[in-house]
Amino acid sequence: MTLPSIESLRCFDAAARLLRFRAAAKAVALTPAALGHRIRQLEEELGVRLFERTTRSVRLTSAGLALVPYARACLDAANGCLRAARGEVGPTPVELTMGTRHELGISWLTPQLRPLASEHPAVTVHLYFGSGPDLLLRVRTLEIDCAISSSRLGDAALDAIAIHPEHYVFVAAPKLVQKTPLRRYEDAGNHRLIDADVDYPLFRYFRDAAEGADRMQFSRVVRIGTIGAIRDLVVAGEGVAVLPNYLVKPDLKARRLQRLFPKVTPLHDYFRLIFRREDPRRPIYEALAASLSRAPLT
């Protein structure tokens, strides 16, 4: 099906308003012959007659009458496209669903919603909470628009903008290591490690660091899906874990947790704003990332 051109609809609208082809031709800056050609072309494309013409009068057919409001709406929309492209209508309202981990969302991202709304009034941000792999999958499958995560990207369909570095510490409850010391790597056999999944996504930041612990062998590894739950178990003395510094900083200060192997500096990662590589809203993501990078990570 061939859609009618904007120019043909413009000629039809002028003829429908004036009901005189010569006057309509003048209104659209065409010759009467050129206007007549446009009208015939439109009628051929639509497969209907739009005007009944005699030597003395021009009137719309029933099909022409039906077309009038839609043709004018189409012309208004085209004019709106032109104005929008020229920046004459202001920013277009945009709604985005941004995914994040529960802990980061509650402690940091939720308090940023008001500043984001102030800096970017045309953008409404909705939040979705999930785990790292879940967030990446939902961005990939279009269930959410973007996500903030430190998960490693291995999907060519996704792109990311770094926002904040994420530092990690290897921690345990003081009462646990007082009872069962963990001063040497060989002591790991007396402890259980708590991590997020089978790939040890948290412990690897300590293991892969300079002076890290490739040879540490724990008695058990317990997989807990969210870092908030891992933190609660470690504070309760149920195991040891590598956790984000921003999350356990209050616990370290209050001595609910203590740092293990303080001479080893774990590798760091980055919180990134992740989105689909082909998403045309990249400029919006870049602007949001710039705003979020100025908000201290707490």
Image (tube, rainbow, N blue to C red):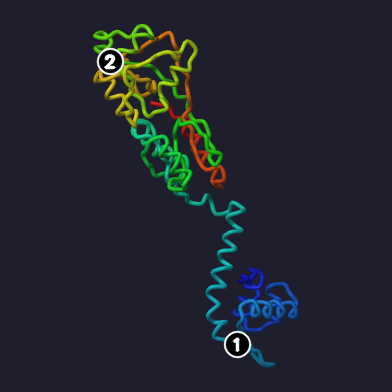
Q: Residue at x 72, y 79 (%)?
A: 37
Give, as a three-letter code, the residue at label 2.
Answer: Ala
54 above or below 143?
A: below
Badge 2 element: loop
Q: The disc labelled 1 sits on which kind of residue?
A: Arg
Residue 59 numbered mark, or none: 1
Mark 2 nearby-residue class (10 Å; few <14, some 14–19, many ≥20): many
Q: Earlier in the sequence, mark 1 or mark 2?
A: 1
Spatial distance from mark 1 to mark 2, Cα to Cα?
88 Å
Is 51 rendered above or below residue 96?
A: below
Q: Position of residue 45 (x, y in %)?
A: 64, 76
Q: Position of residue 260 (x, y in %)?
A: 36, 12
Q: Which residue is mark 2?
A: 173
Quarter holding the C terminus is: top left
User: Considering only vertical position in the picture, is 155 above or below 206?
Assistant: below
In the displayed structure image, the side of residue 246 where residue 54 appears, left or right: right
Residue 80 picture quarter:
bottom right
Q: Residues within 10 Å of mark 1 (few under 14, many from 20)?
A: some
Q: Give residue 231's position: percent from left, percent from top.
A: 31, 24
152 up-or-down from 239: above or below: below
Of 294 and 258, nearer the camera is 258
Please give left or right for residue 137 compared with residue 59 in the image: left
| Residue 11 appears left or right of 203 | right
Quadrant of the drawing holding the N terminus: bottom right
Q: Quadrant of residue 50?
A: bottom right
Dot 1: what SS?
strand
The location of residue 51, given as percent across then percent down, is 62, 85
Q: Nearer the viewer, residue 76 or 198?
A: 198
Query: Which sits in the foreground, 215 or 265?
Result: 215
